[in-house]
Structure formats: C-alpha cells, structure tokens
C-alpha cells in the first residue's frame, strides 16, 4: 500500500511540475500583455472548464501533462478570434508582434520554472530534511544486500554491456556469501573473531584473510548465526574511487588485490546519521550540488544513444542495466520504492534531478521544444537585421510548415524513445530491491 501511494505521490509531483512549466509560459505572456486564451491540465475529454477575463481554464481526463494557448506563437496559426472574426495571429496582442527578447523570456519561462523547482527542492533537502552523512558510511553496520554465487579473480569489462563482467559459477570460486548461505538483510558481526564495525573494517579484514578458512558471525533478525567459509583472492576496486566512473574508465591504479565476501553492502538511509546544513549553508550546498547535477545531466544526454541497445535487451528479457534511461513510469516506480523506504533525501534528489533534466532538455534548439521556438525567433531577428543592413526587404517570419518534416522527425525519434523506455519500465523495471 505504501509503495502504491508513493508512486501516486511522485507521479502527482511530476504532473504539478509540468503544470507549473506551462504556467510559467502563461504568467510571463500575460505579464508582457500577450494574449493567452487557454490553460488546461491534462489532455483528452474535458472534466470541467470555466472562463475568467477572456481565458479558459480547465482540467482534462488524461493526466499526462498540461498545455497553454498563446495567440500568435507561430505565424501559421489559423485560430479565429470570436471577438474580431479574424485569425488570432492578426491580433495586436499576438505573441509574434512583441520584441524577440520578450518572446524569449516567455518561451524560456517553462524551463526556468523547472530550474526554480529543482533549486527549491534541493534547498529544502539540504537545509531542513537533511542528507545522509556519507563520511560516516564506514561506521555503520555491514548489511548484506545483493549476493553473488561466485567471485571473479580478475576485474574484466564485458564488451557487450560495457559493465564489469560477471563471474562464472562454473569456473570461478564459490563466494563466501554462497558458502554461508547469507541472505539480504543479514548483518556481518565478526570475521575470524575480529569485530566488523563498518565497510572499511570488512575490507581490511578480508585483505588479511585471503586463502584462509575463517569463521563468520552474522545476525539475521534476532538470531546470531555463524559458519565457516574460504576467502578467495580477487581483484577489487579500491575504496574512494569515483562512483561515476564507468567500468571502461577503471584503470589498474583503481584496483587492488584482496578477499571478497560476494555481497553488495546495503547502506540504508536509516543507518546513516542525517546532516542538516541550515538555510544559509544549505544554499551553498544547493549551488554546488546543482552544478554537479548539470554536469551529470549533459553526460547522460551523451550516453543515451549507446544505452538504447540495452533497452531492447531488457524488453526481450535480459537483466535490466540500471544505467539505462527510464520514463516517467520508471521514475515514479523508483519514487514509490524510495517513499516506501522513507528515504526522503533520495526521493527529493530524484525529483530535483528530473526537473533539471526536463528544464535543460526543453531548451534544446529543436522543434517542438521551447528551445526550437527561441532559436527561430532569434534567427528571424538576425536575418531581418542583416537584410536591413544590406538594404534588402525584410524576409519576414519563418514558415513553420516548411520545418514540418524536421519537426515530425524529432517527434518520431522522441516517440520511439518514450515507447522503448515505457515498455522496458513495465516489463523489466529498474528496482531498488
């Protein structure tokens, strides 16, 4: 029930963000005196609508977004103004009649709204909600997460997935976790009589126990259990390696020899002390973290084409690469899991990241994105300026109909991408469990 409620809450948050995006266009257009005639949340059949000061507001049945109608946004609009009986683009308050800088502000206002939402969310997170103190990660109990049946003696990269190559149970040594029949949620208490106080202590102990059969004591629920296991030697990542590094970017200097249990350590939000910065320091943390998110967002844009094949593989039943793109469906599912876990820091961070992604993506200079309209407006302005300097007549406005093939191509590519991600998120979703 909590999981389902979390999905609904997160999806509603995304819908509100999109509605505010359109409200950004609407409010800025009205501020400059442009004629905006409609503002609706949702698509499809109208649930209710009302008019106020010449604007129709309403709610539609399909909660997949929102839209606003600003008269004269393109020169090819043929909407008839019921008051004058003329095309809306001929209205003196039509958008195209306003200076290019005002049109730029209106078209960019949607993305600015996303940026404002991201900044506000992060500020609240760092100032009041708090984030897990990562510096204490090596001081929390070692809780077993995912378990591997074997341990690969060497670090290798899979040429197909570009990720670390999985071990082979037929040829590689059995993992201590498999020997002990460990389960997710178990807590490692001691190895060979030495208390394990955290992940660093575990790594240090395993480095000394290579090739030895040791007694491992662990806690499962209220029970304290123990067993013996042989610790195999393996090539493992050194602690402190940048987590954003891909497997292909790992160098020999990033690796060391040591023992491995064959587990992923499950560091839970509830295990870490919470660090709250307060309003002033929270603003500084927000600024620095936003800069990092922007950099990662552009890196993710560049990586998307290379990850498309893994989406096809996931749809066909292969294990889902957690680095593959997700749709709003997948993001809402992850949001639901974070809600269920009570991991508010990750939940708010995910919401801020999505808003930053939406804001930047909408500024791409391609139709039908807002950035495409901005690019055309400035192209028209520069072209008119050059024509005036050369004594030639104003070439006028760009014919959007001539750009239709490019626009349809972009819509087609985006449509296929959305279809792939939504399908993968339904049949083979990324999960935190």
Image: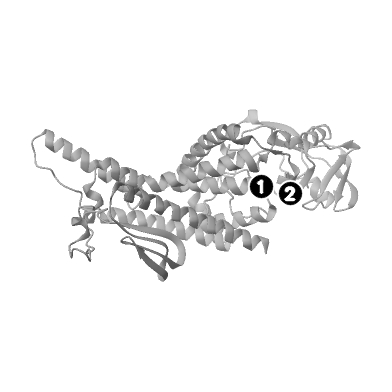
**Residue 421 x %, y %:** 50, 57
The answer to whether residue 318 of the structure is visible from this angle is no
Task: Choose the circle earlier in sequence order: 2 or 1.
Answer: 2
Q: CA distance from mark 2 to mark 1?
A: 17 Å
Residue at the spot x=71%, y=31% of the render? 256
Image check: 191 left or right of 263?
right
Residue to which mark 2 is pinned? 145
The residue positioned 80% from the left and 48% from the top of the image is: 177
Q: Going by the picture, which residue comes out furthest to the top?
A: 253
Q: Secondary structure at mark 1?
A: loop
Identify which residue, 282 or 367, lies in the foreground.
282
Pick out the residue farthest to the front: 53
- Give the position of the C terminus as an image quadrant: bottom right
Cβ–Cβ below 8 Å for labels 2 and 1?
no
Residue under the image location 84 percent in, 50 percent down: 180
Compared to residue 101, the image places residue 411 above or below, namely below
Where is residue 8 drawn, in percent x and y? 58, 61
User: Which label number is shown at residue 166?
Assistant: 1
Rendered location of residue 154, percent (x, y): 69, 38
């Amino acid at each position: 029930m909590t999981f389902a409620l979390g999905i609904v809450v997160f999806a509603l948050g995304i819908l509100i963000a999109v509605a505010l995006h359109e409200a950004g266009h609407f409010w800025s257009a009205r501020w400059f005196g442009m004629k905006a005639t409609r503002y609706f949340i949702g698509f499809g059949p109208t649930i209710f609508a009302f008019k106020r000061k010449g604007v129709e507001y309403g709610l539609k049945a399909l909660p997949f977004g929102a839209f606003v109608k600003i008269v004269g946004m393109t020169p090819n609009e043929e909407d008839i103004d019921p008051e004058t009986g003329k095309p809306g683009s001929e209205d003196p308050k039509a958008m195209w009649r306003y200076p290019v800088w005002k049109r730029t502000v209106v078209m960019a206002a949607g993305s600015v709204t996303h940026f404002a939402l991201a900044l506000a969310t992060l500020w609240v997170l760092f100032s009041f909600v708090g984030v897990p103190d990562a510096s204490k990660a090596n001081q929390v109990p070692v809780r077993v997460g995912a378990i591997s049946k074997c341990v690969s003696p060497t670090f290798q990269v899979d040429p197909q997935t570009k990720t670390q190559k999985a071990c082979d149970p037929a040829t590689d040594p059995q993992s201590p976790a498999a020997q002990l029949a460990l389960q997710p949620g178990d807590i490692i208490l001691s190895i060979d009589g030495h208390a394990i106080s955290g992940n660093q202590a575990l790594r240090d102990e395993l480095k000394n126990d290579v090739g030895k059969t040791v007694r491992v004591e662990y806690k499962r629920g209220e029970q304290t259990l123990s067993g013996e296991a042989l610790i195999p030697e393996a090539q493992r990542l050194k602690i402190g390696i940048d987590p954003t590094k891909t497997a292909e970017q790992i160098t020999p200097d990033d690796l060391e020899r040591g023992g491995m249990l064959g587990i992923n350590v499950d560091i839970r939000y509830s295990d870490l002390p919470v660090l709250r910065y307060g309003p002033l320091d929270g603003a500084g943390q927000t600024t620095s973290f936003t800069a990092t998110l922007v950099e990662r967002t552009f890196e993710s844009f560049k990586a998307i084409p290379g990850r498309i094949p893994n989406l096809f593989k996931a749809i066909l039943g292969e294990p889902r690469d957690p680095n593959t793109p997700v749709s709003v469906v997948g993001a809402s599912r992850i949001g639901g899991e974070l809600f269920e876990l009570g991991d508010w820091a990750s939940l708010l961070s995910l919401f801020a990241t999505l808003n930053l992604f939406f804001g930047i993506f909408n500024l791409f200079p391609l139709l039908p994105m807002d950035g495409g309209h901005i690019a055309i407006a400035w192209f028209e302005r520069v072209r008119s300026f050059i024509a005036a300097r050369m004594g030639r007549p104003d070439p006028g406005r760009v014919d959007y109909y001539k750009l239709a093939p490019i626009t349809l191509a972009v819509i087609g590519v985006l449509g296929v991408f959305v279809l792939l991600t939504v399908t993968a998120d339904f049949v083979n979703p990324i999960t935190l469990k």
